[in-house]
Amino acid sequence: MLRRKKTPYYYVGQEIPTSSNDRYRFLDKTTVSALKTGRFRMLLVAYLFLIAFAVLSVRLFEQTILKKNTVRPQHSLLVAGDLPVNRADIVDRNGTILATSLPTVDLYVDARDISNPEQMARDILKILPTLDKEELLEKLKSQSSFKYLKRNLTPKEQYAINRLGYPQLNFTDGEQRIYPQSHLFSHIIGLTNIDNKGIAGLEMAFHQRLTTDKQPLQLSVDTGVQNIIRYELAKAMDTFSASAGAALVMNAQNGEIIALTSLPDFDPNRPATRTDYNIFNRATLGLYEVGSVMKPFTVAMGLETGLITPDDRVDATKPLRLGRFTVTDFQGKNRFLTIPEVLIYSSNIGSAKIGMAVGVEQQKAFLERFGLLSVVPCELPERGRPIQPDTWREVNGATISYGYGIAVSPLHMATAVSALVNGGLYRPPTFLKNGNKDMPATQIISPKTSQILRHMMRAVIDIGSGKRANIKGYLVGGKTGSAEMQDLHGRYIKGTLRTSFVGAFPMDNPQYVLYVMLENPKKRKEDWYFNTAGWNAAPTGGAMIEAIAPHLGVTPKEELEKPSYIEVAYEQYKPKK
């Protein structure tokens, strides 16, 4: 009788066989072979997983540590607030945003492992049709590890690109500069390039400040005033068919620029629309002969040197001969003129004689004190250097006295006129709110001379060539100027004029100075076919003052009390019975 072999039992604490032979001694050979094969396969799989994990670890180490300076892909979709903004805002004096930055993403390609660049290009162009096909293909075939395909993608574009599933297409954090006011401040703010670096205007001047200090940069400009000035200037250019124009408003007491515009202008949100013509800042970079706007400085120079008094008279009975040149008056009175009348009737003859009496050396020194012979010291990088004679001769002094022979910018004139009417204190212009608070003013003429000029310039607006800028209650004072334009060779173009108006208000204590310039305004039937400044620049300035004065808090006032030297001029003005 066969007996079944008993299987051994093991109890707790009893030693269990450990050798392979002992381990399998109770199993048949087939089972042992199967177990050994299974064990080998498990170890093989484990070793393969270990190798794969090691390869992934090395690759991850290479991409994150060894290449830590390369741009890391950002595959998450753009959500507002996810990405950092590195450039500070620019705001006006009241906190209105003029320039700000929005987080965005840029698309780039790692072209080292692209098997079908043509297909990839077709897929990308379906989403980004504005890309150039040939340029795109060139980038996809470049074998470069980093090539930008498009900057500043919209969230919708990023989502669509992400859905294509190409691992070679990646995103990196970006930042886009936005100008909410569009054209309004283009020549002041300027703009940045695709890499968010300032390339013009205050964006360029304050690039370091805007990228290192997160606090908004607050300017002196007022968006409301700027909007009015630009609107009225554009309206005047249309009305008088002018080819270009410029205007600015300056605080006569502290030098702050309240508004400044140059037309035509451009939209900094659309850099591709810029041209050499519309990016040119005529208010600060343009240099022009200003014509009769220079005459108040000539009279002030005569008074400061003591060579004339307000009660003196100048012989303007006939043209003035200067070698081969003849100085004449436009609609001259052909009589002796009082000093106020030299301004009121804008006499070239009278101004030239005052300038000649002073002499070119004193004249040059006087104009230098007003900053009219050097670059305007202000924050804007686009500034013109005045053009002046290499050698100042008597004939140069005579023509400069009535506005020919030197060329300056509108900003030069507004700054100089501010000093002329505010008591004789020169302060450089500034585009920053409180930009001059720590800078002491320079006394360049006496308060008495400044007061006399205020009365005379008020009379110019009340009864002289600037009558169309006379806004009731605001005591406007100023001067008009018309100068022939020049071609590229410096020859004067017959029949063309560049007209200007400078005004200050209120003239009992001037707070603001306005400068308006129109380039080549045309003659109109409504203006009796005149195109001088009194018919276009002056009414444009008047319309601006009427609109901005209430905005600036200027209270209407009664008329100035007229001193005796002004009364004489008014007596001459009254129609004879």
Image: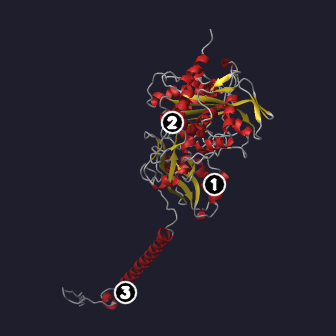
Spatial separation of the CA atoms under disc 2 and disc 1: 68 Å
Spatial separation of the CA atoms under disc 3 and disc 1: 67 Å
Residue on which disc 3 sits: 29
Q: Secondary structure at mark 2?
A: helix
Residue on which disc 2 sits: 447
**Front tag of 3 and 2:** 2
* Residue 187 is at least partly visible in this image: yes
Spatial separation of the CA atoms under disc 3 and disc 2: 123 Å
Q: Secondary structure at mark 1?
A: helix
Q: How is the image coloured?
A: secondary structure
In the rendered image, residue 27, in percent from the top left (x then y), is placed at: 32, 86
The residue furthest right is 324
**Front tag of 2 and 1:** 2
Q: Nearer the viewer, residue 214 or 338?
A: 338
Residue 313 to residue 21: above or below: above
The residue furthest top is 577
Residue on which disc 1 sits: 136
Q: Residue at x 50, y 33 (%)?
A: 512
Residue 44 to residue 229: above or below: below
Query: Which quadrant is the C terminus positioned in?
Result: top right
